[in-house]
Each structure stands twice: as structure tokens, then as C-alpha cells.
Image (cartoon, rainbow, N blue to C red):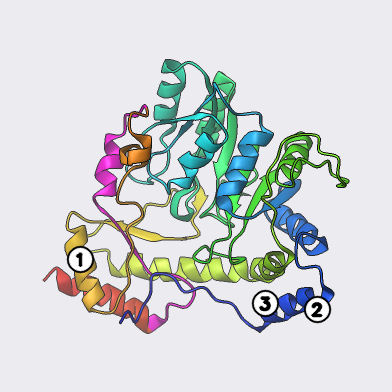
């Protein structure tokens, strides 16, 4: 049995009470609670608008639709991410092109993005992923996007509250997308959110996730859309979780700092955090050439681990033949191992994790 799980969602009485209030109101689908959550989350991200969705993938899909990214367009993104990043591009009718990652941060390499934009015809957008809760190098990426006339969509599914040069992710691109899956730094059970400063993107995204209705609702449908709406029950949970998020993130950073200090002399490479970034450690991910052996040893010691992600997206059967040049991503996928740092990890748990890694190497 795993004594220290890799994830442990924390839901308490405040969430239960908010859900009870929604159920008793009788308005359990999309409604006022969702609008309140959209406004509060946008303000947290220092963005003008929030558009709630049913999950992180639908948030990405709706953002591309709202930006008019579709058939005939290419989107440059990372192959080292959960497959939803690329799937959303294809679901919108566009085609992903994979650029390589930085070997230290695991995030999209802006120089590689520029090489793709220069080489490929039809590139319309770039989708950087703030992987594991560490912001991508946004200034350089925004410069590349400006030079080549590209839209920028941040995939912030793992980075709620992360900061780049004093600004929170979700406030840099034409749109940004978050996931509220149970393992994320905050959850709604299932859910997603788009943030944007653009009025037109917010209006089109809101319409797209609600069957193409205009903002005033009713049965006039101004575009073809989906039912990607968030429920009021999910929003009720999310509003409490958003209040808890700063404390959750601070605990994750504290736990990560302990591990980084404790593993300084261990035969693993601990996470790199540039000086201008504030990491929120959705995952605390080390690198080792003996990943499988270490994972098996930790499992025997009662420590849960995860491999995010063992196969680059371009090596998945669904993406056979998609353009890529990503040797760094391919090597990284063979080395990464994530360790528990979630808020329910205790001091004793941290000692157990660090001791087990040190003992394995003796």
C-alpha cells in the first residue's frame, strides 16, 4: 500500500456547504455561481475575463475556436506534455507542429519555436505549456509571436498561481487555459477556465461553450458551438478552492524546497527554477538515468511516484507523421520521475522520500 501518494485532493466542509447551497437552490447547471467563479478566477490571474468550461481540454479547444484557429492553420507546441495540448489543436481543425524543449526547465524552447515559424508555412499560433507549474519563457515567446504574427495561447493547466517576472500566468497570451482536474493545485472535480484580456475572444469563447448562443442567451444561435459548460456544483467547489490556492501553493513550494535541499548530494537532478519565475509545483520532477529502478524502490518504501510523460506526443500512434525535431524531449521522457509534494505531504513523509532516494543509491 502506498503511504505517500503522488496526489491527494483536499476537499473539506466549506466545499460541502457550498455544494449543498447550490443543490438546495435548484440551479445546479450553468448559472450565477459559474459567473461569480469566472470573475473571481480572472481577477486572481490579473485578466479581464474568465470563461468556465467543462474541463481543461474543452478550454483549449474553445480558445482556439474563439481565436479563429482552424483548418489550414498550424500551431507550434511542445511534444512533452499531456496529449490534450495537441488534441485540442486538432479538435479545432488545425495541425500541431512540435518544437523541442529546454533541457533544464522542460518548457518549450523559444529558439526552437522561432526555427519552426521560419521554416513552416501556415503557422498561426504558438501554444506554450507551463509544465509542472513552472512558467514558460514568455517574454521571448511573445517576441517570436510578434515577429511572425502568431496568436499565443498559454496552456496553464498545471500552473494556477505561477508567476513570470511578477505577473501571474494566464495574463500573457491572447488566451490562457486552466484545468481543474482533481490532481491539479486546485480542483472543481472536473472543470476548466479560459482567461483573456480580449473582449472579442471572451465573447466568442462564451458563445462556443454554450451551443453558439450570444451573451444574452435564449434560442438564437449565432455560431455552431458545443456544450462545454461548467456546472454550478463545480463552480461552488472551485470558489472555495481558489480561496485555498495561495496556501496550497505555498505548502507545495515549502515541500519542494525541503526535497531540493535534502537531495542536493543525491544522484538525481532536482528541478531548475529560473530567478524570474515562481514555480507552484503541480509536480516535483527529478531526472535520473535509473528512473524505473528508483520508482520501484520508492514504491516498496511506500512512496508513490509518477512519470509525466513517458512518451512524447509525436511518438504516440495518433500523431504518427506529425512534423517534429525534439531529441531533448525524447531524452527527457526517459529520465523524469515525479515525487509527492502536495499539501497533505507531512514532514515525516518528506523525510521518508528523501531517505529512500539516498538509501537507494548506497
Determine the image quadrant of residue 155.
top right
Q: Which residue is mark 1?
A: 294
Element at badge 3? helix
Q: From mark 1 to mark 3, how far is it between C-alphas?
A: 37 Å
Q: What residue range appears in magenta?
A: 323-347
- Rendered position, 320 above or below 282: above
Q: Which residue is mark 2?
A: 24
Between residue 50 and residue 111, name the one nearer to us. Answer: 50
Q: How many marks?
A: 3
Element at badge 1? helix
Q: Position of residue 216 (x, y in %)?
A: 88, 46
Tell me the number on the disc at residue 283. Answer: none
Determine the residue positioned at 52% across, 36% down.
Answer: 89
Q: Position of residue 119 (x, y in %)?
A: 41, 16
Decide: marks 1, 3 in contact (CB < 8 A)? no
Q: Which residue is mark 3?
A: 15
Amino acid at each position: 500500500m502506498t503511504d505517500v501518494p503522488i496526489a491527494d485532493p483536499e476537499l473539506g466542509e466549506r466545499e460541502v456547504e457550498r455544494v449543498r447551497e447550490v443543490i438546495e437552490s435548484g440551479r445546479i447547471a450553468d448559472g450565477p455561481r459559474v459567473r461569480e467563479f469566472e470573475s473571481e478566477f480572472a481577477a486572481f490571474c490579473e485578466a479581464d475575463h474568465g470563461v468556465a468550461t467543462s474541463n481543461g481540454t474543452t478550454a483549449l479547444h474553445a480558445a482556439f475556436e474563439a481565436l479563429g484557429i482552424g483548418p489550414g492553420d498550424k500551431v507550434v507546441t511542445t511534444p512533452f506534455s499531456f496529449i490534450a495540448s495537441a488534441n485540442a489543436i486538432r479538435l479545432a481543425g488545425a495541425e500541431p507542429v512540435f518544437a523541442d524543449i529546454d533541457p533544464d526547465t522542460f518548457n518549450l524552447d523559444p529558439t526552437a519555436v522561432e526555427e519552426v515559424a521560419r521554416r513552416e508555412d501556415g503557422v498561426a499560433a504558438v501554444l506554450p505549456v507551463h509544465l509542472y507549474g513552472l512558467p514558460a519563457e514568455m517574454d521571448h515567446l511573445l517576441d517570436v509571436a510578434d515577429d511572425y504574427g502568431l496568436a499565443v495561447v498559454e496552456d496553464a493547466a498545471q500552473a494556477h498561481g505561477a508567476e513570470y517576472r511578477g505577473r501571474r500566468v494566464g495574463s500573457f497570451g491572447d488566451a490562457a487555459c486552466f484545468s481543474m482536474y482533481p490532481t491539479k493545485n486546485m480542483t472543481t472535480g472536473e472543470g476548466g477556465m479560459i482567461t483573456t484580456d480580449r473582449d472579442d475572444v471572451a465573447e466568442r469563447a462564451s458563445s462556443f461553450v454554450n451551443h453558439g448562443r450570444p451573451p444574452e442567451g435564449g434560442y438564437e444561435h449565432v455560431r455552431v458551438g458545443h456544450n462545454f459548460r461548467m456546472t454550478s456544483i463545480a463552480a461552488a467547489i472551485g470558489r472555495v478552492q481558489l480561496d485555498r490556492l495561495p496556501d496550497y501553493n505555498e505548502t507545495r513550494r515549502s515541500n519542494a524546497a525541503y526535497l531540493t535541499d535534502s537531495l542536493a548530494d543525491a544522484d538525481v537532478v532536482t528541478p531548475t527554477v529560473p530567478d524570474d519565475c515562481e514555480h507552484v509545483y503541480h509536480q516535483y520532477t527529478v531526472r535520473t538515468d535509473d528512473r524505473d529502478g528508483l520508482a520501484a524502490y520508492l514504491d516498496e518504501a511506500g512512496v508513490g511516484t509518477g512519470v509525466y510523460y513517458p512518451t512524447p506526443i509525436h511518438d504516440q500512434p495518433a500523431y504518427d507523421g506529425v512534423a517534429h525535431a525534439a531529441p531533448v524531449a525524447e531524452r527527457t521522457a526517459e529520465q523524469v520521475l515525479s515525487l509527492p509534494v502536495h499539501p497533505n505531504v507531512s514532514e515525516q513523509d518528506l523525510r521518508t522520500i528523501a531517505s529512500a532516494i539516498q538509501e537507494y543509491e548506497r
